Amino acid sequence: MRSLDERLFHPLCLTQATLSGSGILGSLAAKLGKACSFRRERNLQLIEQALEELERRILVVVLDEAQNYAHSSLEEVRLLLGLNLPDQPAFALVLIGDEYLLSSFKLRNHRALYSRLACQVALPAWNGSQCAQYLSHALVTAGLSPRCWNRSPPNCWLRPVAACPAASACWLAPPGSMRPVRAFKRLPPSTSKTQCKACLVCRECIPPPRLLESAMSVDPQQIQQAHELYCELTGQKLRLDYLRQRQWYELLHQGFTLVEIRRVIVYLQREIREARRNVGALKLSNLLRPLRGRPQHSQRATPAALCIPFP
């Protein structure tokens, strides 16, 4: 954004992904130099006036963490692109998000916005030298010395101590210290559920192929098939709204297949018939939230997360 010529562009960035549709209008009006109002129609007028004052300069709106915006908020931004039916879009829109962003736009509720995307760019993962350069720059910016990282294996910088004992000297260095800790200390394995136990860099810590394959792509047809399977097995007719599409997507993205979903449903039905489980265990909202109470950065959910003892 800093590299854009101010004579041609006027960039704005919104980083608060929890804003509602009205909140986005108010934030845009305030960043355009207008006194925002509590009334939605007044904020629209202020944005319209600010666009006219920009004259030939192009407004560039950047939404960070776009995958976390609500559907109503993104729909408000989409409608702003056609404010007063201009010959060209009223501004340039840049959406920044994680790997879930593009897949969620392909769902039914976001098709109107997805059809207006002109291009997409997927940034590759950093290698070891890029991670080292970033960490050194961040330490220098914070006023620390990057020398406290020199004794640790470069491939284990991003790994917790308990997961990689070889990096213990690095992680035990006190904040702001100019020298690394000389004593090499092996820490016992952590019992915390929120700590990662393996990294994806070192050869000895590469997870099984099952975990690498879990980050699979999911298309709308798979979501539709999974929902129809649930309705067929339970004898229900449930509407596939946006929230259920999102929940099915999260479940399938972790690597669960239709065979496993059928196995879970059949198991729960048998348990309910034998009075070992409550009927609510088969409720769709409960079935589609296997990660409830688990950290978001955990690996693929296991059957234990569903409280179902698979044989």
Image: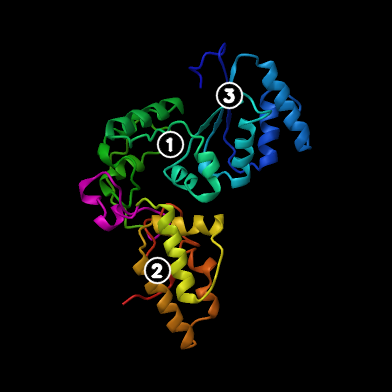
The residue mark sitting in front, 1 or 3, is 3
Query: Which numbered circle lies on residue 207?
Result: none
Residue position marked by numbered label 2 in the rendering = 261
Q: Is residue 289 left or right of residue 171?
A: right
Is mark 3 in CB contact (under 8 Å) with mark 2?
no
Residue marked by disc 3? 88
**Residue 193, can we see it?**
no
Residues at discs 2 and 1 in contact (Cβ within 8 Å)? no
- Residue 291 falls within the magenta-colored stretch: no
Q: Quadrant of residue 86?
A: top right
Of residue 132 and residue 47, the one placed in the foreground of this image is 47
The C terminus lies in quadrant: bottom left
Amino acid marked by disc 3: Gln
Q: Residues within 10 Å of mark 2 (few under 14, many from 20)?
A: some
Residue 157: percent from left, percent from top: 32, 40
The local secondary structure at tag 1 comes to loop
The CA span between labels 3 and 2 is 47 Å
